[in-house]
Amino acid sequence: MNRMLAWMLIPRHSGSVVQRYGTAAVSVAMAAIAGLLLRHYNLPHPFISFSFAAIAITFWYAGTGPGLFAIALSCAVLTYFFTSLKVGNLPWDSYVVIYGVFGFLVSWFSSSRIRAERSCAEARDALEIRVAERTADLTTANQALQQAQEELSQLTQNLAQENLYLEGEIRSDANFKEIVGNSPKLRRVLKLVETVAPTDSTVLIYGETGTGKELIARAIHDLSSRGSRTFVRLNCAAIPAGLLESELFGHEKGAFTGAFAQRIGRLELANNGTLFLDEIGDVPPELQPKLLRVLQEREFERLGSTRTLSTNVRLIAATNRDLSAMVAEGKFRSDLFFRLNVFPVDLPPLRERRDDIPLLVRQFAEDFSRRMKKTIETISPGTMDALCRYPWPGNVRELQNVIERAVILSRGPELVVPPVEMKRHSWSEIAGEERPVRHRRQPVRSILNEVDRDQIIGALKQANGRVGGPDGAASRLGLKRTTFITRMKKLGIDATVVSEASKASSDTSDIADRSHFSSSSLAASSAE
């Protein structure tokens, strides 16, 4: 219906010349036929009205030329029905004037409609073009918005991972945040820290277990330009070799069995910050080339991904091993060692900075007493002297644990160190021993085993080989009988052998005393 109305109402000026002028002739002919039929039956025959309709149709659908042709035909046919009328003295018939005025009006109306249609078509085309442009802009904006949402989701996930890590850092076991000490060797280390901190160079910290390597790494981070960014730590010895790569570089979902979700590695968490790798000597050989690539090219891939990620991280590594010896043995890559050993820092053990022990003791006692809501006001000179003479194979961490136990056991304002701690080796006992150096460092485990062995053997000798009982060796060391026996088996100590050796030594001394007494008595009798 809409198409039919549009065809009837909208002007059509298309078609050939024959079709257009044929439309004029057919329209006038139909008007004439209608008039003749009405006249034949003696009915009113309004040919003029029919001719007006034919003229209007011709102007509307065929244009101005065919419309004028329709006016001429109508005037010619009109003389057959009516007598021509003159308008004054003019030579024209009055119907010619009427047809002309009517044709002009219809032609003007048709032209106006055509111009309006063209304007509407142009406006419609312009609107369609604008709609297409806006649609393209909205599509582009939508794609950009989706990409921004993906980036925001990624950043949100990174922030969540970083928050989890920082919450874990807050709950860590670090009991103090400042480095305590004023010894010359510690001041030299702190001077090196102040020198290297403003740079982005890689730092390798050497030191025995418990010397505070992580505190030095944190001090380097805090004094650097990255101090406001994240400090991420990773103990390479505390994570299985199979999981260390995922922990360091991260992994994609489905990268291996149990990888149910994407995980961000420590390298991504430490971006624009500092990554501290403790126990770097325990990194497996198959992972060392990837770590070397991070140091050289600042690029890596997550486990199970082919997309290369860039990172801007400063690496600080620490170890209690001799990496140069490991390189010589083929257990550590030489190129990675040279990349890590840009700025080495040697931390002295606690036994080499005895001047710092009183400061550390007071600091630990104050911290633990505040935490346990106790009051520790004094430390006896004898206790402090014994603590200073002890070699501390576990370094600051061992001292910290000893002071914590002492605060727990102290009932008054004076710090009481358990007697078992006072029977440790004194400093003079190891003064003549060779000091450990980096290239020939004695393992800490062997030092602890020697200390335990000497304590157990000494207690067995004092108890004449007895383990249990009030005067037994276990009671003398403040240990349970089962714990004492377990340590004896672990160190390969036999109580019977120790007891027999003790008796043999005592028997030898008795024989020597008796021989000395007999010789003295013989000399006295001869004198008489």
Image (cartoon, rainbow, N blue to C red):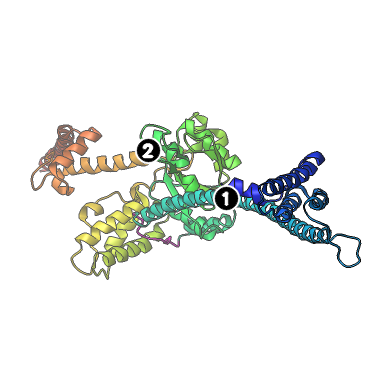
Residue under numbered circle 1? 144
Residue 179 included in the magenta stretch of the image: yes
Q: Indicate the secondary structure of the residue bearing disc 1.
A: helix
Seen at 72% across and 53% down, the residue is 47
* Residue 174 in picture, x, y percent from top left: 36, 56
Name which residue type carries label 2. Phe
* Residue 283 in picture, x, y percent from top left: 45, 36
Q: Of residues 52 and 109, which is closer to you in this image?
A: 52
Q: Of residues 48 and 278, which is closer to you in this image?
A: 48
Mark 1 vs 2, N-terminal side: 1
* Residue 478 in picture, x, y percent from top left: 17, 49
Alpha carbons under labels 1 and 2: distance apart: 29 Å
Q: Is residue 337 visible?
A: no
Residue under numbered circle 2? 260
Magenta span of residues: 173-182
Locate residue 83 relative to residue 428 in the image: left or right: right
Furthest toward the top, the residue is 330
Residue 461 included in the magenta stretch of the image: no
Instruction: Please give the label number shown on residue 308.
Output: none
Locate residue 391 relative to residue 228 in the image: left or right: left
Seen at 49% across and 52% down, the residue is 152
Furthest toward the front, the residue is 42
Q: Indicate the secondary structure of the residue bearing disc 2.
A: loop
Furthest toward the left, the residue is 469
